[in-house]
Image (spheres, coloured by chain):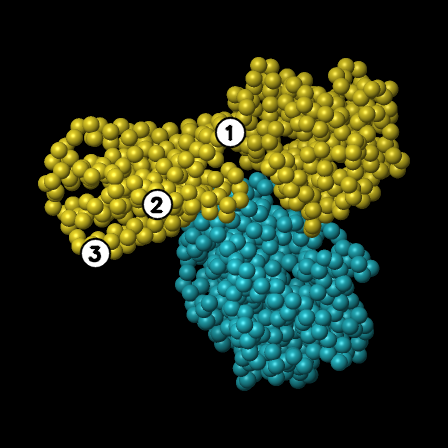
Chain colours: A yellow, B cyan
């Protein structure tokens, strides 16, 4: 309790504390702003509200400062530092986890920002009260404020240029927490506060932060896992995408770049509709082309036809096809279709491949690409691309294209249909309900006469497609009915813009 | 890098082709002008080894002007010519680098859809099957969406004007500027000539007064002071001319924005883009040259000997009835022994090709997705162009990025000295430090970085130069000698180079009594 015997030079230490406290305080604020922008989008809104929240909390803190540490300001300051270290240091990790595992991300976000702002707000007046003994009022205010703002400058420069690129958000927040603990420790020792409990508190917080820093990789992964509803059984980053397979009881799900590709529970609906609709238009299909579809599930359906002699699967990612060919669970899902002697795998960019191959050698083509969420994938939905499919199809052949949801992304769906039509195809749009996806749409297309699926050609053993389901797929109720749409061109991809707007309106509502 | 075409002309200075250091897995080198030969231009003429050869026409220079001159001669059935090129490849500023992942441009990397006046380019594109009749394009070779994006305040935005953080006054001035440009696009003089045509020879001379002031002065007189608008307009000047606003004539600055009118096609801002840049056009132009193209030939002297012209290279003398001089104008005092030193000045550039094992994950950060042209607001370089933009439909695989740096803030001579002094490691450091705030993971994805310094990349349209007497006089033919180079237009774009190439060839044909169709008008 040696509150009164100050060490020489402690006012220097106090001023450095102001500087470091200001730097760390602003970094916490920037972390919250950046994280909210990444996760919620609309960075202007996020930054404005977070800055407002933080400044308001600082105001509240400054007001409350008059009631804090009247008798032992140095002890109060050390405890404050320690609390900031704990709350601020864990803030990024806490927000990540809150986003992944609870619906209350915004609540946690604003609460944490408020708490940190409140504590920082108490801190500066408290420091001024301590410093008052060594300085005159004018000198004091100007020195403290100058250092406070200088710290803010350092933070705002360091944050985007060094901290984010080198450390990332979670590590940055732990490191700042450690700086706060260090300030507390140095402060306490320069004031010779020999209070065992205080030291123990600092040691615990420091240890927690170091532990958090060491585990930050694992925390990131854990937070990511929370984005998926089921336990992850396999995750892999290929040069082309991030592949995640989850499994719960008997249900296996595949996610590519966080987007659900299929659930083993109902994927038969999707793949039966995708494959049998075009193949039943063709008399004795012999050669079939699959573009995309590296999971081998469309191939499984194609290989049901006795007449099929050859299947060519063109998929970008060799790791994806290798995984679904060799992995125990996954190859069981596709009935080992990727190891079938009738199937050949070619790992190539479909956009390039169709431009270089013009042999009319396929009786049916199945086009199964990811949704057009960016301009790169969007090329696979352009008029030019569909035109380049013409020479690949043998006379009397048929084509099917996965076209996203006609219900959630109605404009996008009809834009794709119109584009296929504009590329010189006779089209029949169709859709069905896939529980894990919702209402899903496709386009059936052929060259000379309209495509006519023939029920008699369907292979035996299908679980969904039958005499009752087939005609139904071609009927569109009013909320999915055709919309007039411009076509999607390479140099002007309206589809990518529609797609983004359509899905954003679903997510926001 | 919208609207950039550099053309012929890297003969220039001896560049040190320093070899790579291989620290931390990055290889690469400074490639470029054939300096071993270039050095010898300043030395006295050396005895040539082989006996002189005779030919009808010598084309000195194998850039776009030389190549289009050869193309025009061949169309007229004149086949007895040779083309002399300093480098290992023809093409000048339209040369390309070849990497396993993709070819990539060394400089010029796109061609806007030609204007109606651009008859030479239209004819060429028809020949290549890119333009059928007069209205059908091969869509796959037009620039795919998204064309360009700009990085500003930590976020990518579609388009080139930096919108984030702009004030309402910034937007108001941008709208005024755009309306102003539209007025110039519609403007015609009494004889129906455009204000700013491509080729520039078809422009109305009534607006020559605009050449007397700089673009900076022009902007000031319109009360345009928005920093963002000034950046945007200067970006155009740096991109197409390698010049700051102060060093660009207002006529040239307005020409950049008002001249590309889409030639009657919609939308108006379409352009052809190829992975290898404008080398696609070079491949077409040089396909029939065969043995007539002589590379690694330094033209050292061009002189009149009786009725013939004698063209001397480091190891061969050519005697010809006619010479098409398709080299930069500033070399004329050296090669033709002319006393007058024309005041043609040239902007230096550094171009880098970054060979990437994979696209760095940061390409998909915040905002608009990877585009063909990716620009950083308020940055010394012009950004980077993605060679695989037209060929890939994914955002991950190997790629090549071409980074452009004009030295518009320095006097050209000083910039050239700095380029000479800089080594490969220094350039790598500069490039990565400029791009790392946006792509902190670029360095790990990059396997090879090649650098090309172009000492005299493009002629500079300084105020007063474009409509000067000396520029126009430099294009006048002599007896049996014809001048072809983009610098004769005062700025360096494919359309101007090909215009002068065809013009010079037609002057030569006319003197041979073989004047045929006028490609410049139909």
Query: Could you tell me which chain the residue with mark 3 belongs to?
Result: A
Q: Is residue A280 above or below residue B406?
A: above
Q: Whole-percent x and y of residue A196?
A: 17, 28
Quick check: A94 left or right of B358? left
**Circles 3 and 2 on the same subunit:** yes
Q: Whole-percent x and y of residue B435?
A: 47, 51
For marks 3 and 2, the one nearer the N-term is: 2
- Can see residue A389? no
**Label 1 with label 2: CB-CB less than 8 Å:** no
Which one is nearer the viewer's eye here, A487 or B164?
B164
Q: Which residue is mark 1?
A: A103
Residue A59 numbered tag: 2
Q: Disc 2 on helix, strand or loop?
A: helix
Q: Disc 1 on helix, strand or loop?
A: loop
For marks 1 and 2, the one nearer the N-term is: 2
Residue B83 numbered tag: none
Q: Whole-percent x and y of residue B125?
A: 74, 60
Q: Nearer the viewer, mark 3 or mark 2?
A: 2
């Amino acid at each position: 309790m040696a509150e009164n015997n100050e060490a020489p030079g402690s006012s220097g230490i106090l001023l450095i504390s102001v500087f470091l406290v200001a730097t760390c305080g602003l970094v916490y604020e920037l972390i919250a702003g950046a994280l909210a922008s990444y996760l919620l989008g609309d960075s202007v809104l996020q930054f404005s509200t977070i800055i407002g929240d933080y400044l308001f909390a600082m105001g509240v803190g400054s007001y409350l400062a008059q009631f804090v540490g009247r008798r032992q300001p140095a002890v109060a300051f050390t405890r404050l530092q320690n609390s900031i270290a704990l709350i601020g240091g864990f803030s990024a990790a806490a927000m990540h986890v809150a986003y992944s595992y609870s619906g209350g991300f915004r609540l946690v976000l604003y609460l944490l920002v408020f708490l940190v702002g409140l504590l920082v707000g108490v801190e500066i007046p408290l420091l001024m009260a301590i410093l008052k003994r060594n300085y005159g009022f004018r000198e004091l205010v100007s020195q403290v404020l100058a250092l406070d703002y200088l710290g803010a400058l350092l933070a705002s420069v360091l944050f985007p240029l060094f901290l984010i690129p080198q450390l990332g958000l979670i590590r940055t927040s732990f490191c700042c927490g450690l700086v706060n603990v260090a300030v507390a420790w140095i402060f306490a020792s320069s004031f010779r506060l020999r209070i065992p409990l205080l030291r123990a508190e600092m040691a615990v917080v420091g240890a927690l932060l170091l532990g958090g820093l060491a585990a930050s990789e694992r925390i990131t992964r854990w937070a990511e896992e929370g984005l998926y509803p089921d336990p992850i059984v396999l995750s892999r980053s290929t040069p082309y995408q991030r592949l995640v397979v989850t499994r719960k009881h008997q249900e296996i799900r595949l996610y590519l770049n966080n987007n659900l590709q299929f659930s083993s529970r109902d994927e038969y609906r999707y793949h039966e509709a995708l494959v049998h609709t075009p193949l039943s238009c063709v008399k004795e299909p012999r050669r079939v082309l699959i573009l995309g579809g590296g999971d081998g599930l469309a191939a499984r359906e194609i290989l049901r036809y006795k007449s099929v002699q050859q299947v060519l699967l063109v998929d970008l990612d060799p790791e994806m096809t290798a995984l679904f060919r060799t992995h125990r669970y996954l190859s069981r899902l596709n009935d080992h279709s990727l190891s079938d002697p009738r199937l050949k795998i070619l790992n190539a960019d479909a956009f390039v491949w169709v431009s270089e191959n013009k042999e009319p050698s396929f009786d049916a083509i199945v086009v199964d690409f990811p949704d057009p969420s960016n301009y790169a994938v969007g090329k696979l939905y352009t008029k030019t691309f569909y035109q380049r499919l013409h020479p690949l199809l043998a006379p009397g052949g048929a084509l099917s294209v996965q076209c996203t949801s006609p219900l959630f992304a109605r404009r996008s769906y009809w834009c794709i249909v119109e584009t296929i039509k504009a590329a010189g195809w006779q089209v029949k749009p169709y859709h069905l309900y896939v529980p894990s996806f919702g209402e899903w749409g496709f386009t059936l297309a052929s060259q000379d006469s309209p495509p006519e699926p023939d029920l008699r050609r369907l292979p035996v053993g299908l679980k969904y497609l039958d005499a009752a389901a087939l005609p139904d797929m071609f009927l569109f109720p009013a909320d999915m009915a055709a919309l007039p749409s411009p076509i999607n061109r390479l140099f002007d991809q309206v589809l990518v813009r529609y797609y983004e707007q359509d899905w954003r309106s679903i997510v926001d509502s | 890098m919208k609207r950039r075409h550099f053309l012929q002309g890297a003969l220039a200075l001896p560049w040190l082709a320093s070899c790579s250091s291989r620290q931390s897995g990055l290889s690469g080198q400074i490639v470029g002008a054939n300096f071993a030969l270039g050095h010898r231009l300043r030395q006295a003429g050396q005895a040539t080894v082989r006996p002189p050869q005779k030919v009808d026409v010598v084309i000195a220079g194998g850039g776009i002007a030389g190549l289009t001159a050869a193309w025009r001669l061949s169309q007229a059935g004149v086949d007895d010519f040779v083309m002399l090129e300093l480098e290992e490849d023809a093409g000048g500023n339209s040369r390309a680098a070849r990497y396993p992942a993709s070819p990539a441009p060394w400089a010029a990397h796109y061609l806007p859809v030609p204007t109606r006046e651009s008859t030479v380019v239209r004819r060429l594109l028809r020949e290549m099957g890119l333009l059928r009749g007069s209205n059908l394009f091969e869509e796959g070779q037009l620039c795919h969406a998204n064309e360009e994006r700009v990085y500003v305040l930590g976020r990518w935005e579609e388009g080139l004007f930096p919108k984030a953080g702009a004030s309402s006054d910034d937007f108001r001035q941008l709208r005024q500027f755009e309306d102003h440009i539209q007025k110039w696009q519609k403007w015609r003089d009494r004889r129906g000539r455009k204000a700013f045509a491509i080729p520039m020879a078809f422009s109305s001379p009534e607006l020559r007064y605009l050449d007397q002031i700089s673009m900076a002065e022009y902007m000031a007189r319109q009360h345009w002071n928005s920093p963002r608008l000034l950046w945007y307009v200067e970006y155009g000047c740096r991109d197409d001319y390698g010049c700051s606003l102060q060093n660009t004539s207002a006529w040239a600055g307005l020409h950049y924005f008002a001249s590309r009118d889409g030639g009657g096609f919609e939308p108006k801002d379409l352009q052809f883009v190829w992975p290898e840049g404008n080398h696609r056009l070079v491949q077409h132009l040089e396909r029939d040259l065969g043995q007539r193209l002589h590379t690694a030939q330094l033209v050292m002297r061009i002189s009149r000997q009786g009725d013939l012209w004698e063209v001397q290279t480091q190891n061969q003398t050519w005697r010809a009835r006619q010479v098409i001089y398709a080299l930069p104008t500033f070399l004329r005092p050296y090669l033709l022994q002319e006393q007058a030193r024309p005041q043609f000045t040239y902007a230096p550039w550094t171009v880098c090709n970054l060979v990437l094992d994979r696209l760095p994950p940061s390409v998909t950060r915040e905002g608009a997705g990877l585009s063909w042209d990716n620009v950083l607001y308020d940055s010394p370089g012009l950004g980077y162009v993605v060679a695989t933009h037209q060929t890939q439909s994914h955002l991950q695989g190997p790629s090549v990025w071409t980074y452009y740096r004009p030295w518009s803030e320095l006097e050209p001579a000083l910039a050239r000295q700095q380029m000479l002094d800089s080594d490969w490691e220094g350039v790598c450091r500069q490039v990565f430090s400029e791009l790392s705030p946006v792509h902190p993971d670029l360095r790990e994805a990059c396997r090879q970085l090649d650098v090309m310094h172009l000492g005299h990349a493009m002629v500079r349209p300084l105020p007063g130069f474009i409509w000067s007497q000396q520029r126009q006089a430099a294009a006048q033919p002599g007896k049996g000698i014809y001048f072809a180079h983009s610098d004769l237009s005062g700025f360096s774009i494919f359309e101007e180079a090909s215009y002068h190439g065809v013009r010079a060839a037609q002057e030569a044909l006319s003197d041979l009594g073989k004047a045929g169709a006028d490609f410049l008008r139909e």
